[in-house]
Amino acid sequence: MTDFNDEMYDHRFMVLEIKATQIRKLLLGSLLLAKDAWKDALSGTQEGIRVLQSIEAAAEDFIDPSITDPVEKLDNVLTVINRRARAIVVVLDYIAHNKQ
């Protein structure tokens, strides 16, 4: 019975890791789209340039492939997700406050 429970736990954890990885990739795509769509508007001010730099930093943030522990891997993926989501919020905030 213990092996079955362990297998169920491992499977459920793997599903969570896959979902987190998908979200991480979607956020990267969103960042790249935002950078492409708003690059001209953002590069016109110092604040906009800082926003572009935060986009680039978040887009370059990747998971550490050397991590093998499943919990640490998930934590690493969630950290990348957090950074990318925050960068998207920064872009949206900048756009909202600097609408013409």
Image (spheres, rainbow, N blue to C red):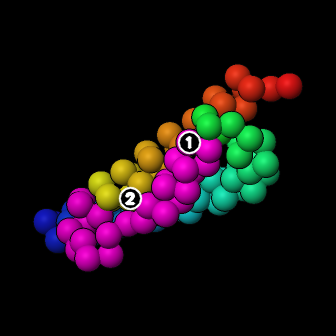
Which SS class for mark 2?
helix
Could you say which is closer to the camera, residue 25 or residue 83?
83
Q: Position of residue 25 (x, y in %)?
A: 56, 62
Of the 4 image quadrants, the one containing the N terminus is bottom left
Of the 4 image quadrants, the one containing the C terminus is top right
**In this view of the protein, can residue 99 be seen by the observer?**
yes
Magenta stretch encompasses residue 72: yes
Res 7 quadrant in image: bottom left
**In this view of the protein, can residue 8 be seen by the observer?**
no
Magenta stretch encompasses residue 37: no
Residue reaching furthest bottom?
66
Q: Residue beneath label 1, please?
A: 50
Give me the disc on residue 77: 2
> Magenta residues?
49-73
Q: Is residue 28 left or right of residue 32?
A: left
Q: Position of residue 61 (x, y in %)?
A: 44, 61
Q: Is residue 67 left or right of residue 100?
A: left
Residue type at mark 2?
A: Val
Could you say which is closer to the camera, residue 46 or residue 8?
46
The answer to whether mark 1 and mark 2 are in CB contact below 8 A is no
Q: Residues within 10 Å of mark 2 (few under 14, many from 20)?
A: many
